[in-house]
Image (tube, helix red, strand yellow):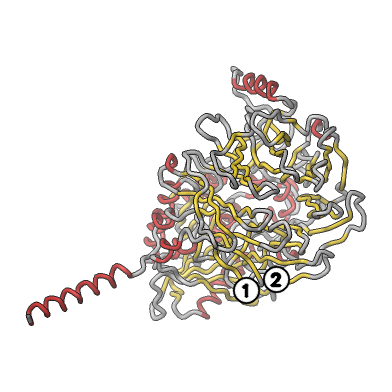
Amino acid sequence: MIGLRLRCVMLFLVTASTITVFAQKKVITHESLWAMKRVGAPAISPNGKWVVYSVQDPSYDPKLVKTDLWIVATDKSVAPRKLTDSKASEAAYTWAPASDKIAFTSKKEDDEVSQVYILDIANGGEAQKITNLSSGASAPVFSPDGKKILFTSRVYAKAFEDSVFKKMDKAVKDRKYKARVYTSFPVRDFDQWIDEKQTHVYIQDAVPNAVPTNLFKHINIVNEQGFAFSGKPVFSPDGQTILIAATTESTTAAYREPANNIYAIDVKTGKEKLVIANNGNSYSEPALSADGTVIYFTNTIVNNGKLYNEGRLYKASYPAVQNIEKINIPDNPVVQYVPTPKGIYVVQDDSAKYKVLLVANDGKTWSQFTPNEAASFTNVAVSENGEAVVASYESAVAPPEIALLKNKQSQLLSEHNKAVLAALDYGTVEDFWFKSKQGKQIHNLLVKPANFDPNKKYPLFVLMHGGPASAFRHNYGYRWNYQLLASDKYVIVMTNYTGSTGFGEAFANSIQFDPFKTPAEEILQGAEEAIKKYSFIDANKQFAGGASYGGHMANWMGVTTTHFKCLISHAGLFNSESQWGSSDVIYGRELMNGGTPWMNTKTFKNQNPIRYAGNLKTPMLVTIGERDYRVPINNTLELWSALQRMKVPSKLLVFPDENHWILNAENSRFFYEQLHEWVQGYVK
């Protein structure tokens, strides 16, 4: 008996020990990062009872990636459940006014292009295909009475009928030559060559096999060479008109900032009426109050010689646009807004977070609606009466989920990544500030590694953000994930240098004519301040890297300092003159540098990395997507040639199928592997 008891005790100890080992949290890997569900934006029912959202099941095999729609009750009386489960993915979901149906887009088995489907939530059954356009359908919106559906489609400029589009499309495909022909700028956009198509708005009855009407068929502005429609069409409360923001100046982008006007299009006649005309300003994102007597819109000053102008939120009477007033909110970017009877919900980029404000309907007072925590709230969706509010919630340690917002509190309605996150040991993320040598208050984020030991010394990864009109925030990313970059090996410091957004328009604009020098000084000071503040940083082992503008900064560091053991540059500018001539966006670069390259401005001469290529000494990992037209590959090749000419240890990764970002799962995994291997060779 004694022996049996001893064996039982020993078995218990072994089992308990084993449980402890299995329960120990793990360091994040690319596999665990990629396994996380991608939870999409919430769409709340008008009655405020239900939320529909998308969930993508990721995979390293693109053929296995799929996105389904889920539904959850706002009072949590019904747990999240799948609405759709098909091979095809669903997107662009929206509710009918009666809260009984949803419309969404999908490219199902028999579809050559995406179409609009409607699913009866109240009565169940299969989703019904509503549209059948050869050009496809996107962005559906129900009319206020729920009887019609509005959507967009990309068609050839004069193809107002589907039969005409088919003929024109066939003619294009049957061409024996493959030349692209242009007479104006731009010719490329991000990762695609601009084609002969435009985005048009259609309307049809919300039933299968209804005949759609192209609402742009009779408007005059569609015939202008510079016409381009942007944003999302908005119905008036009576359903008789739609509001759109559009420009007729898109072909002037080489030498000025194209401006939008706001138009109202009569649904019956198809005629347009100019509602708000640009007068040195660009007007976008129109919305109407529930009674149709107030119009809201964003107003951005353009062509005033400044590099950065924030869009301000305005209101005016409607349909007679009078008494135009600016909404009184902080001096930060308006990311989104939703007018309701209760007030205007506004998402702002503010001090490394996305916050939600509730603004009084008179536009004069506001209060913060979201809690003060290290997190970001975006994609706000609000019930018809303005009482039920949901949003996407995320932080630096948690990918987006759906949250209910109320009284400065948030409650998760979905937790699709709970099990994955519970198994991971994430390093904590904290804010710190310092006063720059120019007297500015500079914000920073610091990420500790997994399995953090305060008594150890960790190499310092100085991570630099893109933009520059962007910022490091308390949010979650997959392209440059803070936790995966830190792993259990490094401390990361991320400085929101001059030019960053969320710290006032003046701070963002002060990078003009000084694209690299001052931001680099602040980034280096950020590392210095972190080393003073945190004893666990090894000052002798520092490296830096970034993508896009962060890649530009890595290249600038490479030619101006030997401070770092090694550098990582993705999609980085190395020659600002050739970047001006080859990028899909050029006028902003002219504003940044004070003129064109042939004007020999001070900035072009003094802050162009290639002019200092003879100083290259720091080992550099260089990566680029071959389909990147924002920072085309020629800049990377110029950097690579200089590194090789200067005999600097370097490595080049070219991804033929990637654009400005590395998005393919296997490419992403290889990139992270190469980055960590590169860094370990210099700071192990």
Residue 245 in view in this figure: no
Instruction: Classify 488 as above or below 308.
Output: below
Mark 2–mark 1 Cα distance, whole angstroms, equals 9 Å
Percent across and percent down for residue 230 are 73, 43
Q: Is residue 199 above or below residue 609?
A: above
Q: Position of residue 69 (x, y in %)?
A: 54, 48
**Residue lying at the far front of the rendered structure:** 123
Residue drawn 83% across and 68% down?
364
Amino acid tagged 1: Asn
Residue 103: quarter of image: top right
Residue 153 lies, in percent from the top left, at: 67, 34
Q: Residues within 10 Å of mark 2 (few under 14, many from 20)?
A: some
Report the front residue among 630 and 539: 630
Q: Secondary structure at mark 1?
A: loop
**Does the rendering let one see residue 103?**
yes
Quarter of the image where one finds residue 420: bottom left
Give coordinates of residue 509: x percent, y percent: 73, 61
**Viewer-proximal residue, 170 or 138?**
138
User: 457 or 58: which is nearer to us?
Assistant: 58
- Circle 2: residue type: Gln
Q: Quadrant of the C terminus?
A: bottom left
What residue is disc 2 on? 368
The residue lying at 45 percent from left, 63 percent from top is: 418
Q: Residue at x 83, y 34 (%)?
A: 268
What label does residue 582 carry, if any? none
**CB of mark 2 within 8 Å of CB of mark 1?**
yes
* Residue 372 disc label: 1
- Report the quarter where the N terminus lies: bottom left
In this rendering, position of residue 630 left or right of residue 222: left
Local SS, label 2? strand
Q: In the picture provided, is 429 more to the left or to the right than 423? A: right
